[in-house]
Image (spheres, rainbow, N blue to C red):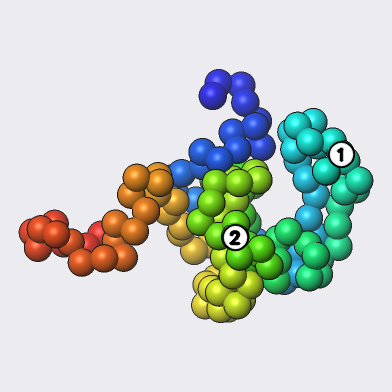
Amino acid sequence: KEGRKPWDAAKDFEGAAVIGRKVAWPRWTPTRDMIKREPDRYAKWAGGMAGGDANPLGARALYLFRGGRDTFYRIHGTADARSIGQATSAGCIRLFNQDIVHLAGQTASGTRVIVVPKAETGRWTQPPTNPAEGAPT
């Protein structure tokens, strides 16, 4: 991944970050890589799309930062229920709009976020199979 820009590393973001910004009805702009890959689909939005029901970022977006810099990854809402839990688009984490509205209301900028690899998805949301394993700290 040497020399790659954050938006080129799509779909493989993992690890710790912090919420650097929270935005209600965020403006969306496809990345240069998205436009290059699918110009017929994304080029018309190169200047951005205002927030609203048709916007891919949904009702809220939590912007993930590392070292004080935007990673270009987001936790955001979507009206496309089929995309929840799927590795699509530019690698962001999508939630139902009602869930991101709730999450955004319960978290502050600066909150630490840990994005786990797909193999660990759900690990901490179910009781451990080995009681000695415990829960994360």
Q: Residues within 10 Å of mark 2 (few under 14, many from 20)?
A: few
Whether residues under marks 2 and 1 lie with C-beta atoms below 8 angstroms apart, the answer is: no
Residue drawn where x is 51% and y is 56% of the image: 85
User: Is there any visible trace of residue 94 in the rendered image?
Assistant: no
Q: What is the three-letter code of the residue carrying label 2?
A: Arg
Residue drawn where x is 52% and y is 77% of the image: 106
Question: In x, y percent, where is residue 128?
Answer: 18, 61
Question: In x, y percent, where is residue 111?
Answer: 49, 63
Question: In x, y percent, where is residue 31?
Answer: 75, 41
Figure quadrant of the C terminus: bottom left
Work out how far the residue at label 2 is from the one at label 1, CA to CA, in angstroms. Answer: 22 Å
Picture layout, residue 125 above or below residue 9: below
Q: In the visual, does 66 lie left or right of 51?
A: left
Picture layout, residue 64 above or below residue 80: above
Figure quadrant of the N terminus: top right
Label of residue 40 in the image: 1
Q: Which residue is mark 2?
A: 82
Q: Secondary structure at mark 1?
A: helix
Q: Residues within 10 Å of mark 1 (few under 14, many from 20)?
A: few
Residue drawn where x is 29% and y is 57% of the image: 123
Question: In x, y percent, where is residue 19?
Answer: 56, 59
Q: What is the three-letter code of the residue carrying label 1?
A: Asp
User: Is there any visible trace of residue 134 in the rendered image?
Assistant: yes
Q: In the visual, does 96 lie left or right of 16?
A: right
